[in-house]
Image (cartoon, rainbow, N blue to C red):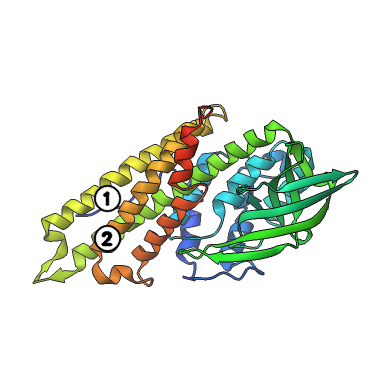
Amino acid sequence: MTFHATPMFPGDLYDTTARVAAAAPVTETFESQEPSETWSQFLQLGWQGVLIDEAHDGAGASLGDVAAIAEAAGRHALAQPLAARCAVVPLLLAGLPGASDVLRAMAAGEASVCPVLDTGQVPLAAVRDGDRLTLNGRLHGADLTEPATHFVFVATQDDGLPLLVLAPRDAVPGHASTWLGIDGRQTADIALAGVTLAASSVLAQGEGVHTRVERASAVGGLLACAQTVGAIGAMIEQTIEYLTTRVQFGVALATFQALRHRVVEMYVAYENVRGMVRRQVLDLCEGPASGSPRDIALVKLYLSVTGRQVAESAIQLHGGIGMSRELPAARLAMHALACSLQWGDRFAHLDRLARPALH
């Protein structure tokens, strides 16, 4: 009984990320003031610039290349905000004149932008007065696992006009409440009261903002799925290795038919989600109009359930040691669960699928 997961998008990006991820230290917390060594390497490698066009000093590559990075990182349960900083932000800022300098700085690894796109139940209120923009409200769910130089978020004027705002981190001095996720991600809610920015911080406005945010968020969810695929593949490999080497009653656990059947169920689930995610990434590589938000929401919904099932199976098949954080499979299981909550959990995607306008 042998198995080795095949990358969805093999190549140099996958191999390089896998090497860096394999050498990353196992940590449970991140120092928010300084980037981790792993994140510093990703910045130096230019991963933030993979989707940025060549006019802004990026690689101008495809979403499949970022998916390769995400899958390789998922195999080692890396909590770094790769999907957010390397895909969601470049898509949000693409084609916006006011974002040119930040995009070049991102491609060079000199800036890192944290997207905060969850408006919560009460939208962030914005008031424009001449050349000033005043903000009141809260930024929900800022992923500060690694430090950011800027925030990009949506604010709403009194007349309901949505604004896409890019602000330096130092210009958003609100009080933050911080939470640590099960896989080490650090998330913050930041309360803003009378925070004033220059009006030039507004990059876009109108209904096009919602379209841009919806598309970027869908891609973020798809890349979280790619991370989960990587984690599931690694979990199956490690589970098979454990069952093959662990001996009980004088025989290897891999000889027990009930356990073999459980592993087969994990493998079938893996092949299903791997094919689904790969297909959606390839569709989006053909152009923005090729990817369907509804199809991506369905994949994210399905994988949120399947990822949890495979994670639970991996822990159970490892027995008591499966509950230990020192076990790689246990950390992968927690990572898969955390990814299922990124860019919308299964309930959020059920709500999205219920919208008549989601095609």
Do we see residue 26 in this rendering?
Answer: yes
- Check disc 2: other Cα within 10 Å, few if <14, some if 14-19, many if 20+: many
Which residue is at the far left? 250
Query: Which residue is pictured at 20% across the width and 63% down the height?
Result: 243
List the residue tagged with mark 1: 266
Residue 96, quarter of the rendered image: top right
Residue under the image location 68 percent in, 50 percent down: 107
Q: Are marks 2 and 1 in contact (CB under 8 Å)?
A: yes
Residue farthest right in this picture: 130
In this picture, residue 238 sits left or right of residue 175: left
Q: Position of residue 131 (x, y in %)?
A: 89, 45
Q: How many marks?
A: 2
- Relative to residue 157, is residue 24 depicted above or below? below
Please determine whether, in this image, residue 349 is positioned above or below residue 32: above
**Corner quadrant of residue 254:** bottom left
Which mark sits nearer the N-terminus, 2 or 1?
2
Left/right of residue 157 with respect to residue 187 in the rendered view:
right
**Residue 25 or 330: which is nearer the viewer?**
330
Q: Which residue is mark 2?
A: 239
Q: Quadrant of the N terminus?
A: bottom left
Name the kind of residue labelled 1 in the image: Met
Q: Is residue 10 visible?
A: no
The picture quadrant where one finds residue 347 is top left
Q: Amino acid at mark 2?
A: Thr
Q: Residue at x 61, y 71 (%)?
A: 31
| Image spot of residue 2 (x, y percent) | 23, 54
- Residue drawn at the location 40% of the way across and 61% of the way down: 334
Q: Residues within 10 Å of mark 1 (few under 14, many from 20)?
A: many
Question: Secondary structure under badge 2?
Answer: helix
